[in-house]
Image (cartoon, helix red, strand yellow):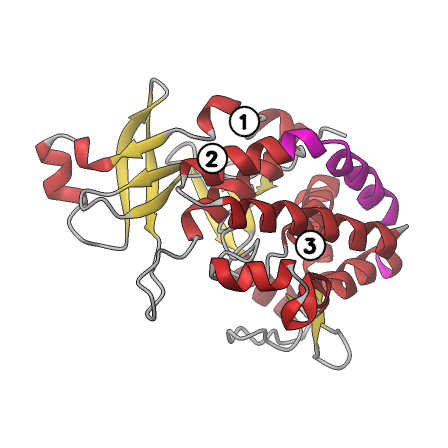
Amino acid sequence: MRSQLQHQYMPTPSPTTATHIIDLGALDAEQAREQLGSKEKFWVDIEIDGETATWLFKQSKRFESTGQVIGDHWSEHLASRLMRCAGVPAHVTRLARDAQGCWGVLCRNVLRSQTEQLVHGVELLIRRASAHGKVYRAEMNYPTGYDVGRVYRTLHELCGDDGAQHFADMLLLDTWLRNADRHDENWGIIRVAGGAARPCPAYDNASCLGRTLTPSYMQDLLDGRRHGLDAFLARGKSAFTHPDTGRRLTHEEALLLLAQEHGAREWLRRRLDIVAGMHERAAAEVEAVLGAAGCGDTEVRFVLTLLDQSLQRITRCIA
């Protein structure tokens, strides 16, 4: 199941890095002057695990009503780690606090040299549509024509089987994690000067796992209130639209469309078997990451239950 891409990029994460919190306030004065301050998102060159690299810090926002930190930091970190545990290339992340002590996540630059370039999906879809005498509407909010078949074919044309399989893997893991934000700027390819293109590891994976829900709302869903967790999962939407009607699809609808109409069912089943077989590792990751991020028992139980019920829904969908 491991492609050449997976051998080259993003090995299975070490358990010790799940709880490692980077203190950006400890950077030297020159770095602090140039790159910190109170910005919500910034790039920083920092040594982690004995290697200096460029990382993007993204500060987590807060609920306006309560001032409580929204879980973007733990959801991005946990989602990327679970993807990598399942053998799906994703960017490397670390929990972090900025110079003001605010929670956030560090995401390592997916480019490894100045000869590499990230080309976002929206640009690829516009080019492909133009080459076929068509128009791709690049507006946000789920544009008409943003369907799984179009993305699947685009990546297959540019990156061969690696590209098609990587998209299928991302869609499966996004469904498991309930990521609703795989829009056309949240995937792409990496072009190397004078070389072939390859699919970019998954990035911007934070919009998942119910990270915007308050603990009290999570508890309501676990207790069957607000129609319960299964209904919450059922009404969740993917980022993709129906190729004929433009209707935004649920997670399972998008996955089923890829399985039935684009020949990806067997590959999806094989990746699903890997996800199903990592139950203990996934549970350990959830407990470690959320514990390090200061979450309570309610958040841990909610995420564990969400992953379990989501996996059951996927199994029924592509069985």
Callout 3: 10 Å neighbours few (<14), some, many (20+)?
many
Q: Secondary structure at mark 3?
A: helix
For mark 3, what is the residue?
175
* Lower sequence index among marks 3 and 1: 1
Q: CA distance from mark 1 to mark 2?
A: 8 Å
Farthest residue to the bottom: give it: 245
Q: Give the structural element (helix, strand or loop) at label 1.
A: loop
Q: Position of residue 32 (x, y in %)?
A: 14, 39
Indicate yes or no whether the magenta region holds residue 268.
yes
Q: Quadrant of the N terminus?
A: top right
Note whether 215 is above or below 85 in the view shown. Answer: below
Amino acid on which disc 2 is placed: Val
Kind of residue at disc 3: Thr
Whichever of labels 1 and 2 marks the residue nearer the N terminus, that label is 1
* Label 1 CA crowd tier, 10 Å (few <14, some 14–19, many 20+): some
Q: Is residue 108 magenta?
A: no
Disc 1 and disc 2 in contact, CB within 8 angstroms: yes
Nearest to N terminus: mark 3 or mark 2: 2
Which residue, given by chain and number where applicable, does mark 1 sit on?
13
- Expressed as whole percent of the image width and height from the top left, the position of residue 159 reads 66, 44
Amino acid type, label 1: Pro
Q: Residue at x 26, y 39 (%)?
A: 44
Out of 42 and 275, give the one closest to the viewer: 275
Q: Tell how many labels.
A: 3
Give the magenta range: 261-282
Whole-angstrom CA distance, mark 3 to mark 1, is: 21 Å
Closer to the camera: disc 3 or disc 2?
Answer: 3
Q: Judge from the rendering whether residue 158 lies leftward or rightward of residue 253; answer left or right.
A: left
Question: What residue is pinned by disc 2?
Answer: 92
Residue 192 in picture, x, y percent from top left: 50, 38
